[in-house]
Image (cartoon, helix red, strand yellow):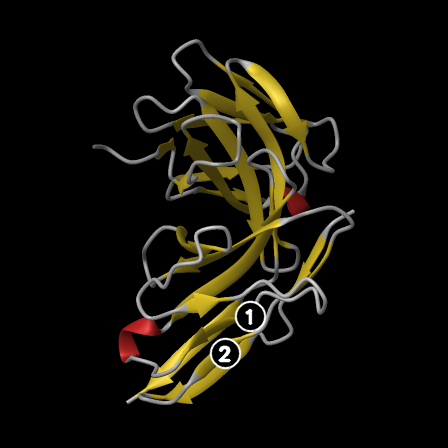
Amino acid sequence: AQRVTQPEKLLSVFKGAPVELKCNYSYSGSPELFWYVQYSRQRLQLLLRHISRESIKGFTADLNKGETSFHLKKPFAQEEDSAMYYCALSRNAGNMLTFGGGTRLMVKP
Amino acid sequence: KAGVTQTPRYLIKTRGQQVTLSCSPISGHRSVSWYQQTPGQGLQFLFEYFSETQRNKGNFPGRFSGRQFSNSRSEMNVSTLELGDSALYLCASSLDASGINEQFFGPGTRLTVL
């Protein structure tokens, strides 16, 4: 069975500091990895997915199959990045997502 | 275009009752997935429907069921409610069941079981 682990429930950084939200997964097949974000009073929404290999709002994430990780990074955090971030995995086909427990990012001024 | 809508937004029920939640996907989307979100267990997949057929089912008891109509709207039902069923229930819609297309989430239905 697949599993997603986000070891940090809360990450607090100052504006302008680098951010790394950790995500580790376990799955025997070829997973697809996602980062979802939920801003205050807004819906859960897709931030990025590993197959896109693109940067969204300055965030990037690289799939490391050797370390089974998909950490989310941003070189300079902004206050508007404060939100709940969820790492998720889907099997190689389909919409079924397995979510990690989430990390709350707080960016202080 | 309008996003995913869920009704009702809030529900209060008592133990032993049953409840039906509704999800209307984005126009043109044919896949609807349901998730349960609780502080203790986080976001957990319930089931996915595509073209009126259940494609995947999560690890939930048979008290949790769902269906999808020909217009892609979906309902989920929970029978014999337990206190532990108190949660935010989210649905998400996607164009199809391939996993290639983005899933869009609704605002959720907050169910409280007393």
Image quarter of residue B71: top left
Q: Earlier in the sequence, mark 1 or mark 2?
A: 2
In the image, residue A49 sits, relative to residue B13, either above or below, namely below
Image quarter of residue B81: top right
| Closer to us: A63 or B39 | A63
Q: Where is residue A96 shown, x and y percent of the image?
A: 60, 38
Number of numbered markers: 2
Give, as a three-letter code, the residue at label 1.
His
Work out which quarter of the rendered image holds the C terminus of chain B and state it. top right
Whether the residues at callouts 1 and 2 have beta carbons within 8 Å, the answer is yes
Q: Where is residue B33 shown, x and y percent of the image?
A: 52, 32
**Residue under circle 1?**
A71
How many residues crowd mark 1 within 10 Å: few (<14), some (14–19), many (20+)?
A: some
> SS class of the residue under badge 1?
loop
Q: Residue at x 72, y 66 (%)?
A: A66
Q: Which residue is drawn at 62% across and 41% down?
A: B45
Q: Where is residue B93 shown, x and y percent of the image?
A: 43, 32
Query: Left or right: A26 with respect to B103?
Result: right
Give, as a three-letter code, the residue at label 2.
Glu
**Residue under circle 2?**
A20
Q: Which chain hosts label 1?
A: A
